[in-house]
Amino acid sequence: TDLLLLPGDGIGPEVTAQVRRVAAKLIPELTIDERPFGGTSFDQLGTPLSDETLATAKAAKAVLMGAVGGPQYANVPRDKRPEAGLLGLRAGMGVFANLRPALCFQPLADASTLKREVVEGLDFMIVRELTGGIYFGSPRFIEELPGGGKRAVDTQVYTTPEIERVARVAFELARGRRNKVTSAEKSNVMDSGLLWREVVTDLHRREYADVALEHILADNAAMQIVKNPKQFDVMVTDNLFGDILSDAAAQLTGSLGMLPSAALGLPGTPGLYEPIHGSAPDIAGKGIANPLAAILSFEMALRWSLGRPDLAARLYAAVERALESGARTPDLGGALTSEQMGDAVLAAL
Amino acid sequence: TDLLLLPGDGIGPEVTAQVRRVAAKLIPELTIDERPFGGTSFDQLGTPLSDETLATAKAAKAVLMGAVGGPQYANVPRDKRPEAGLLGLRAGMGVFANLRPALCFQPLADASTLKREVVEGLDFMIVRELTGGIYFGSPRFIEELPGGGKRAVDTQVYTTPEIERVARVAFELARGRRNKVTSAEKSNVMDSGLLWREVVTDLHRREYADVALEHILADNAAMQIVKNPKQFDVMVTDNLFGDILSDAAAQLTGSLGMLPSAALGLPGTPGLYEPIHGSAPDIAGKGIANPLAAILSFEMALRWSLGRPDLAARLYAAVERALESGARTPDLGGALTSEQMGDAVLAAL
Ligand SMILES: CC(C)[C@H](C(=O)O)[C@@H](O)C(=O)O
Ligand SMILES: CC(C)[C@H](C(=O)O)[C@@H](O)C(=O)O
């Protein structure tokens, strides 16, 4: 299989359906497979990520996930929840570098809560470490305290190779962009932050001295993302900070419904592509979810896993033209259905 | 001593000097003491927090800190850095609940990077846990790996009583405000997040069922702070998330130079008051730092530790009048010096 679709939960199937249509038109020879994943898989198979789905994912060229989760899974044991399936898929595929663009599409420059001049032309990329840190460190547990009450522990662990490989992705990306990397951590309070800073600094000195490197504390990064996001080109950070900072950055663009992401592992291994948005239970089943984040995730797959940057560029341009022509789903203040937004992109292709 | 001033580093002495003037006019009987702290203390005494300073702080009614840190301390061993002094002071004073308002002052409603309608009238409060979590958990270390490279570990630890006491502060505050608490964590990936959610939920059910309670994932909180900050009244969260989320929220108001904070411990123990801003090495010594964050920190001290909410209200109104009359330091687009801004507040008192 070239492309494995994991529609998942909530609006996931609605947005991946539009990816299918776009893929069929853009690259008819692409083989596409589909598997249950997340809550849908839990409902059918008792597990959010079956061995068979993981094996199929690892054998594909690219995997595109719709969304996972929903309120109906709140009381499922944590290791069976949709989110656990997602963490298992990321770890199982070894996709350690998560590319999350914060982009302002010109026709949407007024859709942001930020002033137009602050976000117009914005184009920066967060590279989030995705398979380490506090998401995966052990020990982690909740225990009863002798005198009553409980104690919970989570552990953040990072090693030199884990930091180096994700920093390398950031530096390589920057070379093809505006040649600047900002590394965010809390080296003033965390030992993993100290090591993070040291490893990034070393790698930069040894191999990427031509790229401008800045270090920033994660709290200040959150502030600067709101204050002056255009100062950034590529920001590299750990799993937890990346989760939070990329969500703040996503909001700059006006709608979560617009933003794709790519998670990459070692060269030659498949990438995992996901819209940044979640399963959106409030609008699931209504057919009005914005499919552009999923379609742009496919654009990233064309570029990073399917060896077709030419088609990626065509698709990106088609999305821009669809927006210019006024195509808007409800999240963007319009009234188009997911299908009609798919039509608009197809028409512009 | 009623009030212990710790001017600290960078612009710290410049802003606390204006607090002295305001305090002298507003409440002449207040006894004020001053001690070295942070880098300044390290330079003089070889430690950022001397035993004597900590003892004086614990014996005062309120402690007001200016700012700590600066590039000249980057290579000092971490336990001697200005930041280590601050963490030691917070822990030593036992000030576990850090109140960080995100306020939009009406005359500054256009100073934000966010659109006026998104921030006008904004008034929410972040309650950050301040003496636990990953800032203080052990083990924490960096070790050499056998095959080369290093491994760094940080540990997040929270217990039921630690979570309960800070949540209690949030619920109590909400009762005097708009009666809503939002609790932010990552219960979908962290065990401490699960415990956090459970303890807050329990306490709410047992004692604060009259207050509206919402749970939000920390990544979504970062996004909602940019998207629709007026939905929040009181947000309670852990030390690390509070650090990041409060910096994002601070930026909503247009200038860091405006925002105070209060760190409170058990009833009857002194509070620690700090402007949110740092030592601002770029403008230190120029006499142009905005003293309002420090002056408003004193306002919080009057309210929370010095038993004078009446004078706090007078001071707050004076700051608003000074802003209405057009008083602006450079961070707000004006040209006043710190001293002239102090004059403007004194004139309005
Ligand atoms: C669903 C959740 C486990 C996930 C994360 O925290 O990584 C999500 O927030 C994301 O950012 O992809
Ligand atoms: C200086 C630093 C240790 C501190 C923190 O991270 O708590 C600061 O960022 C703050 O928010 O007060």
Image (spheres, coloured by chain):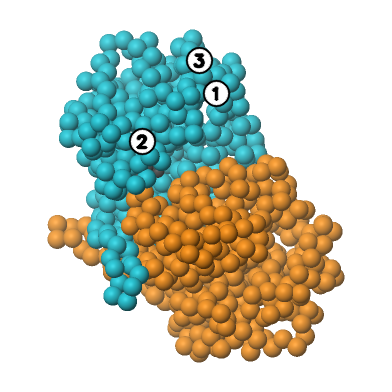
Chain colours: A orange, B cyan
Q: Residue A17: x, y in percent?
A: 69, 76
Q: Is mark 2 within 8 Å of ligand 2?
A: yes
Percent position of residue A247, x then y: 55, 56
Q: Pinpoint residue B109: horizontal percent, then vertical percent.
A: 61, 31
Q: Measure the alpha-carbon separation of dots 3 and 1.
A: 9 Å
Q: Choose top left, top right, bottom left or bottom right for residue A1.
A: bottom right
User: Cβ–Cβ below 8 Å for labels 2 and 1?
Assistant: no
Query: Where does ligand 2 appear, by image quarter?
Result: top left
Q: Relative to residue A338, is residue A131 drawn left or right?
A: left
The alpha-carbon separation of the residues under discs 2 and 1 comes to 21 Å
Residue at position x 50%, y 49% from top? A221
Q: Is residue A154 visible?
A: no
| Residue linked to disc 2 | B68
Q: Residue at x 45, y 58 (%)?
A: A201
Left or right for B23, reference A287: left
Q: Quadrant of residue A127?
A: bottom right
| First-in-chain label (3 vs 1) | 1
Q: Nearer the viewer, residue B116 or B282?
A: B282
Which residue: 47% across, 16% down?
B339
The x and y percentages for residue B129 are 33, 46
Instruction: Tell me what residue is drawn at x 55 percent, y 39 percent.
Output: B252
| Amino acid bearing label 3 | Gln
Q: Amino acid at mark 1?
A: Thr
Q: Residue furthest left?
A: A146
Q: Tell me the chain of label 3.
A: B
Q: Secondary structure at mark 3?
A: helix
- According to the picture, the residue beneath numbered tag 3 turns out to be B340
Tell me if I can see residue A313 in this picture: yes
Disc 1: host chain: B
Q: Which residue is mark 1?
A: B329
Quadrant placement of the C terminus of chain B: top left
